[in-house]
Amino acid sequence: YGTGGDTVANPELRIRWVAYSGSIAEVGLDGRVYLPIEDGTRFGLMFGVPLAFHLSDFVRIDTGVYLPTLFYDPTQLAISIPGYFWFQVSEKLWLGPQAAVRFASLGNDGHHNDLLLGFGMGYQVMQAIDLKWWALAPNIDNGLHQWGVGFGAQFRIGE
């Protein structure tokens, strides 16, 4: 979120709770806060219901429904449905293609639908700490004119 002209995106803080964890499927609740450090951006929230499907010890699909809200005047709303395909290539390393569809209402600027494509990778540093990297084209409708890379750290509590 952000990068209307800056090189670095607005950071986000996120918390996720696993409501159900089975051998094939997981269901959770996800909450995020977007911190507006870029000029001209506003505070935002996102709530979601993440789903993970374990097809084998080697393949997992992450999906769900997410509802980002940005508090501009008027408020901008969206529905995002990702499909992340993760392949466990070693005990600590996973990678794979990412895709998502996003249906957005931009207040007075109308509506638009986006197809996002990318590639991600993660590495487990310690039992409860993962490092994640991804490259993402946030709107491929007009070619790959916009793209970005990201990095994050995940700290799991209770492991």
Image: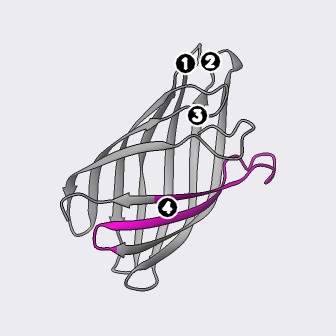
Q: Which residues are magenta?
A: 126-152
Residue count near mark 4 (Cα–Cα under 10 Å), binned few <14, some 14–19, many ≥20: many
Amino acid identity at mark 2: Gly
- State the separation of the CA atoms marked 3 and 4: 28 Å
Q: Position of residue 8 (x, y in %)?
A: 65, 46
Q: Secondary structure at mark 1?
A: loop
Which residue matches tag 3? 37
Asked if marks 1 and 2 touch (Cβ < 8 Å), the reply is yes
Q: Is residue 74 above or below residue 22?
A: above
- State the separation of the CA atoms marked 3 and 1: 18 Å
Using the image, tell me which numbered label, if any, was put on residue 133: none
Q: Position of residue 32 (x, y in %)?
A: 40, 39
Asked if marks 3 and 4 touch (Cβ < 8 Å), the reply is no
Name which of mark 4 and mark 1 comes first in the sequence: 1
Q: Quadrant of the N terminus?
A: top right
Residue at 48% of width from left, 34% of height from top?
68
The answer to whether residue 130 is magenta is yes
Which residue matches tag 2? 107
Residue count near mark 3 (Cα–Cα under 10 Å), binned few <14, some 14–19, many ≥20: some
Which residue matches tag 4? 84
Residue count near mark 2 (Cα–Cα under 10 Å), binned few <14, some 14–19, many ≥20: few
Q: Secondary structure at mark 3?
A: loop
Lateral position of residue 69 relative to residue 113, left or right: left
Name which of mark 1 and mark 2 comes first in the sequence: 1
Name which of mark 2 and mark 4 comes first in the sequence: 4
Which residue matches tag 1? 75
- State the separation of the CA atoms marked 4 and 1: 28 Å
Q: Secondary structure at mark 4?
A: strand
